[in-house]
Amino acid sequence: MEPTPTARRKPTIRDVAAAAGVSRGTVSRVINGGHWVSPDARIAVEEAIERTGYTANHAARSLATGRSGSLAFLMTEPQHLLFDDPTFALLLRGAAAALSERGMTLVLLIAGTPAERATVEHYVRAGHVDGVLLISSHEADPLLDSLLEAGIPTVSCGVPLGHRAEVLSVSVDESGSAREMTAYLRSRGHRRIAMIAGPDDTPGGRFRLVGFRDEMGSDFDPALVERGDYSSDSGAAAMARLLEKAPDIDAVFAASDSMAAGAVQTLRRAGRRVPEDVAVAGFDDSGLAATHEPALTTMRQPWEQLSERMVTLLLDAIAGRPAAPVVLATTLVPRDSA
């Protein structure tokens, strides 16, 4: 009797070798990405794999190579920010696509609480991933120290404060970008310019404020700086504090588009028109800026490049290839809000 589809034997390396007309050793080298395989043999094996429907046993391969074939996408933020902040989704999508092209998988890990941090630390140390893409880095976070102690290859999105010499990173020119946006606002005739900065223990929160302060020069007023946590609500609250202290401000530079959107809400509730009374600028261009009303002037981060370069850098580090930090350029995008 013909066996049912569910009862059929799974194809093996032996079947692939027979179909390709090569040895099992050649098939194994192709599957494991090894060298010393001729182009013709590689093509024959790949075609045989497709014809036979062979699927590699990743658990066995992991035992043989010491590699899991997976990387971790690690967020050290509360879970809701994955959905509230579009920047995380863009990075996640880009990293997943970059790994898919390489036949690898991406594991999403969130460590926003001490309990989550302990679970993530145990999971990573157990060897379930080959390396970590650290998406949100905070200066005093003990998780990064734990990764370093365990020798886990790690690449940070943004300069890892306190660990610049120890951890590879892919970042944008935070301070230079902030200087460019501040200079743009000043060129439009604005003089009383406030800033809604991010948390000081994050690279974006710290260095974007440095760039703003440097460009303002002698016109910098520390009273015109408030901080948020990159969320819309925090931007709205920061804008309310600024208006209470300095009702004469004529422009606001927020360190994220979400905080800029929150600032616009507060300004409207206060009867201020944007941009006629107060210009508003953001940072990221993650999708929110273009669809917001009014559309937000912002600094565009190269999201696809950030993800791709992080994956490439981490795989280089895992393989023991030379690797160095990467700094990417941003682009100023003028829109209706400023």
Image: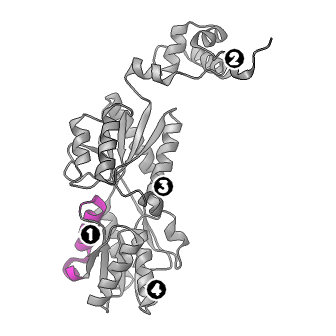
Residue 59, given in percent of the width and then of the height, sits at: 46, 23
Helix, strand or loop status at disc 2: loop
Verify whether residue 210 appears in magenta. Answer: yes
The residue under label 3 is: 89
Q: Main secondary structure of the magenta part?
A: helix
Counting labels gives: 4
Give the Cα separation between the discs numbered 4 and 3: 28 Å
- The magenta-colored residue range is 201-223
Q: Identify residue type, mark 4.
A: Val
Given residues 13 and 335, the one toward you in this image is 13
Foreground label between 2 and 1: 2
Residue shown at the point (67%, 18%) measured from the top left: 52
The residue under label 1 is: 209
Residue shown at the point (24%, 52%) measured from the top left: 141
The residue under label 2 is: 8
Q: Give the quarter of the figure containing the C terminus.
A: bottom left
Position of 230 relative to 337 (above/below): above
* Disc nearer the start of the sequence (3/2): 2
Position of 48 relative to 119 (above/below): above
Position of 109 relative to 192 (above/below): above
Residue 71, given in percent of the width and then of the height, sits at: 41, 37
Q: Identify residue type, mark 3.
A: Ala
Give the Cα separation between the discs numbered 2 and 1: 63 Å
